Image: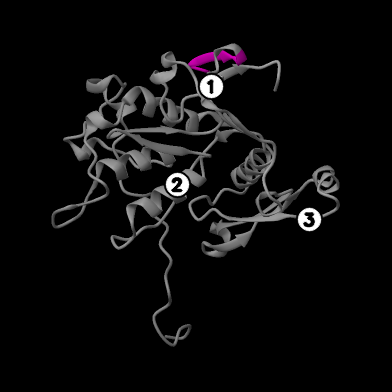
Amino acid sequence: RELFNSLPKVVAVLNGIPLYDPRKDTSVGGSGAHRWATPSTWESTRNPMVMIYAILRGIAVPGGGTWGLGVAAEDLPLSNWFAAMNACDVVVDGAPAYQARIEISFGDEPADVIEELLKVCSGQLAEIGGIWKASAGAPGLPVYYFSDDDMIISEGNTFTPFGSLSQTFNGVQGTYPDPDALWQSKDAPPRHDAALEATDQGRVLTASLTFSACPYPAQVQRLMLAYLNDERRFRRHSLALPPDAAILEPLDVVSWSSAVN
C-alpha cells in the first residue's frame, strides 16, 4: 500500500502451448516420443513450420472444438514438412535460422496467423488438389531440368525483364516486437543499398515490413536482406514445357539452361 495506488499491471511471458512435432514421432518416421493422439507427449516450440503444421491440423480448444483448418494428416506429406521444419532449425550465428513467437486469440483467422508465421521464415505454402506443401528459406535442389530446346514455342512464351516503379525497392525498413520494451513494436535498423539507389536514378524506394511473430533482431535483419534481394530478381518468364513437366507442382524448383537468357 505504500508503493501502489492500485493493483499493478502485469505482463506474462509464456513458453507457449505444447505442439505436436512429427519429426519427434517414431510412429510416422521421426525420432522421439511425440504422438498425435497423446498431447501429453508434445512440447512447446519456436519452429514456425511446426506452428503452421499444427494450425493446419487444428489445435484443440479447452471446452471442445478446434482452432485451425482441420486438414487431415495424409494431406500433409511428411517428407515435405520435415524438410521445411529442418530448414528452420539450421543454425546460423549460433541460433536457429528461423524462430517465431506469437500471441493469438481464438478470434484470429488461422490464415492470417499462418501468413505472419510464413514471413519469419521466408516461407511459402501451397495447396495442390487438397495436398498442402510448404517451403522455408532459400530454394531447394531442382527436381526438373530443361533447356531452350525443350520449350514448346508454338504455345507462346513471355518475358518481363523488370516491373513497374511501384514494384521496385532498393531499401527495407521493418518493425518487430521488442521483449526488452514489454513486447512493444520497435523499428529495426533499415537496410539500404547505395548501388541500387544509383541504378534507380537516385531514388530511395523503401518497402515497409512488419514481423509481428519475430522478436529476434538478427533474424529480422536476415529477413529484410532476403526480401530486398528477392525483390531485385526482376526477370519473370511464362513458358510452355513438354508433357513430362506435368509432374511439377507449386513450390518445386527447376533448372533452366538457356543460351538466349
The residue type indicated by label 2 comes to Leu
Between the C-alphas of marks 1 and 2, the distance is 42 Å
Instruction: Report whether residue 210 is seen.
Output: yes
Which of the two discs, 3 and 2, sits closer to the camera? Answer: 3
Which of the two discs, 3 and 1, sits closer to the camera? Answer: 1
Foreground pick, 20 / 164: 164
- Look at the picture and state if 153 lies above or below 94: above
Q: Quadrant of the C terminus?
A: top right
Local SS, label 2: helix
Q: Quadrant of residue 260?
A: top right
Sequence-first disc among 3 and 2: 2
Give residue 104's position: percent from left, percent from top.
36, 58
Foreground pick, 191 / 40: 191
Colour pattern: one colour
* Span shown in magenta: 140-148
The residue type indicated by label 3 comes to Val
According to the image, label 3 marks what residue? 204
The residue type indicated by label 1 comes to Ser
Local SS, label 1: helix
Between the C-alphas of marks 3 and 2, the distance is 29 Å
Q: Which mark is residue 154?
A: 1
Give residue 211's position: percent from left, percent from top.
54, 53
Instruction: Report whether residue 18 is seen.
Output: no
Horizontal side of residue 10 vs 64, given as left or right: right
Between the C-alphas of marks 3 and 1, the distance is 42 Å
Give residue 233's position: percent from left, percent from top.
67, 36
Q: Callout 3: few (<14), some (14-19), or many (20+) C-alpha neighbours within 10 Å?
A: some
